[in-house]
Image: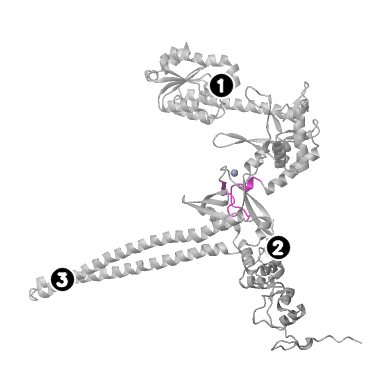
Amino acid sequence: MYQDSMSSGKVSADHLRRGAYLYIRQSSLKQVVNNTESTQRQYALRGRAVALGWREEQITVIDTDQGRSGASAAGRDGFAALTSAVSLGLAGIVLGLEVSRLARNNTDWHRLLEICALTCTLILDEDGLYDPRTFNDRLVLGMKGTMSEAELHLLGARLRGGQLSKARRGELKQGLPIGYVYDPCDRVVFDPDSQIRGAVERLFATFARTGSARAVVTGFARDRMLFPARIRKGPRTGEIHWEPLKHWRVLSILHNPCYAGAFCYGRRQATHTPGGKTGQRLLPRGQWDTLIEDHHPGYITFAQWEANTEALAANAQSRGEDRRTGPAREGPALLQGLVICARCGRRMTVGYRQYRNQLFPDYRCMTSAIQDGARVCQRIPGHTIDQAVETLLLGRLTPLAIEASLAVTDEITAQAREADRLRAGHVTRAEHRADLARRRYLAVDPDNRLVADSLEADWNTALREAREARDQYERARAAAEPVETTTRARLATLAADVHALWHDPNTEQRERKRIARLLITDVTLDKTEQITAHVRLTGGQIHTLTLDKPLVGGKAWQTHPDTVALIDELLDHHTHRQIAQILNERGITSGKGRPFHELMVRDIRDRYQLKHRYQRLREQGLLSFAEYAAAAGTSEQTVKVWRRNGLIEGVPYNEKNGYLFHPPGPDAPAVQQGVPYATRRPAGFEPKPPRKYRRRAV
Ligand SMILES: [Zn+2]
């Protein structure tokens, strides 16, 4: 009776004019399904509202938060809708089963109370009707909120305390990884399904053999092996399904000490973001709450598990997340973190190859290769790309920027000139006025003192004004003039500074990368016949660079095709030694950048199956010694003597006195018939002095 009189006293016509909002909430889906009784009680509050005077159609039911936890307002649209309805003054009363549970978070709750007080909104729960404007009611409501939060906390603490003590005894039942099940006595045992056990054993065996998680994924993918996974939620919870093995799953299994027969608890820590989202973070081993070795049978030994995690950590140092995006790092790859794969749109990572004590970057698109064991999407040598982008930045971009700045400077200069012209006009006008005043003064009768005095004063003023105008003009001009020259000079030094900084050997590569990051948003790479790099600059402009694929392996050392063609051409007229000399004179080098010598020319001739010089000369109709001797009607020996003494000219085909001869012409030396052999000498024959022999020691 008392309650009713109190209630009726609080409800006014104004409240009744506004709507009634019934807020219904259940914490979890399970509660929604099982705890229908509570829902019925919440809907019964509707009757209370009607009894207080609201019409049925005025009651708005907010039940969109069914199945959401009340611990925070984030993600609860219903609570937000309720708050906005109250703050807009649409609600005369808010109804809830236990109103403090409208918001389990005290901050949310107090904000709601505040708004209710401001908008004269009543609050009703099963215990009574409250007017947040009155001190007593507000106190009670505040207490309810605090108690509710405390209850939540105690509940959590009790739950966690129980869980912890159980975990420390190793008796806590937790979700088991694939390959393990609980037996009827709640002990952890191997999965009875031999196929599942086989898959897990195979995973560990492959890792033991290869030492790489990626190799495990590739191995499974190559053999088209699937891996079991247990469905964790939804109507099929607990069922096993088989799927291709993913890299993250391999890592999670290798990191999980459960497979080494250990029981552990507290490996993960819940994290909360300011947006109200929760996540999980894996803690380092030292921070785990409980780790009990030899708790159950293991697929591997604990020592093996430790070795595996160490191996994984070592692998991660060379190719891990840190190579993806994020800040500029030490490595030489200029575009680290900026490259995107044109084929699949994923971000490419950086890997380094060492060659002659120098690191060469490779840009790789590895995501699907790592996760699914598929082929590497793209692998592009980064050295040439880095160079091309560097050239673009320094050679093209900096002048562009400077050009733009100079254009601005020119405009400023033009404006300054215009201002100068205006100021000059001002001076001319002032001088003209002074001149006018002077003439007026001179024209007046000097006896008319009164007029003359005032005109003199005018003249003086005009003169002063003209002088001031001129001074001002000079000052302005002095201030304006250096602008142009200094700006130009400063811009020029700025450009020089960037170049100097870039090429300074003391500049760390990280600084160059930072400069690149300031200018480049990203670079999209594609490798087909050539390498295409779309460089997106910070301003949104795109430059497309097309580069030749760098030659790999032995190809990089091959003789340039043009050089081979040249050697082929030269072989018609020159010996190997001569060709080597000609090539060196022309500054042509071998594939490895070295000067040529005759053996290299011979090797190239053999490698590219060029025609031998001998064969070429023979095809031109040149004769051998014997053939020439026959044609000349003499002996081979004579021909040799003739050649040696310069009577006939031989065409050398190698460096070892190999000669061929043009057929004897009319002016060829002839054998003098009828003359004794010893004196058979053609005209002009001068015998060579006898060879000097080394005197033998007696
Ligand atoms: Zn890709």
Tell which tag, 2 or 3, sits nearer the viewer: 2
Name the foreground residue: 563 vs 327: 563
The image position of residue 695, as x and y in percent, is 86, 87
Q: Are marks 2 and 1 in contact (CB under 8 Å)?
A: no
Residue 198 bears which disc, if any?
none
Q: CA distance from mark 2 to mark 1?
A: 87 Å
Q: Amino acid at mark 3?
A: Leu
Q: Amino acid at mark 2?
A: Asp
Q: Which region shows up in magenta?
A: 320-341
Q: Amino acid at mark 1?
A: Gln
- Quarter of image, ligand 1: top right
For this view, does 86 lie left or right of residue 585? left
How dense is the environment of label 3, judged by Cα within 10 Å: few (below 14), some, or many (20 and up)?
A: some
The image position of residue 398, as x and y in percent, is 48, 60
Q: What residue is shown with label 1?
A: 26
Q: Main secondary structure of the magenta part?
A: loop
N-term-proximal mark, 1 vs 3: 1
- SS at mark 3? helix
- SS at mark 1? loop
N-term-proximal mark, 2 vs 3: 3
- SS at mark 2? helix
Can you tell me whether the CB of the residue at mark 2 lies under 8 Å from the nearest atom of ligand 1?
no
Q: CA distance from mark 1 to mark 3?
A: 97 Å
Q: What residue is shown with label 2?
A: 606
Q: CA distance from mark 2 to mark 3?
A: 102 Å
Q: Quadrant of the C terminus?
A: bottom right
Q: What residue is shown with label 3?
A: 436
Name the foreground residue: 626 vs 459: 626
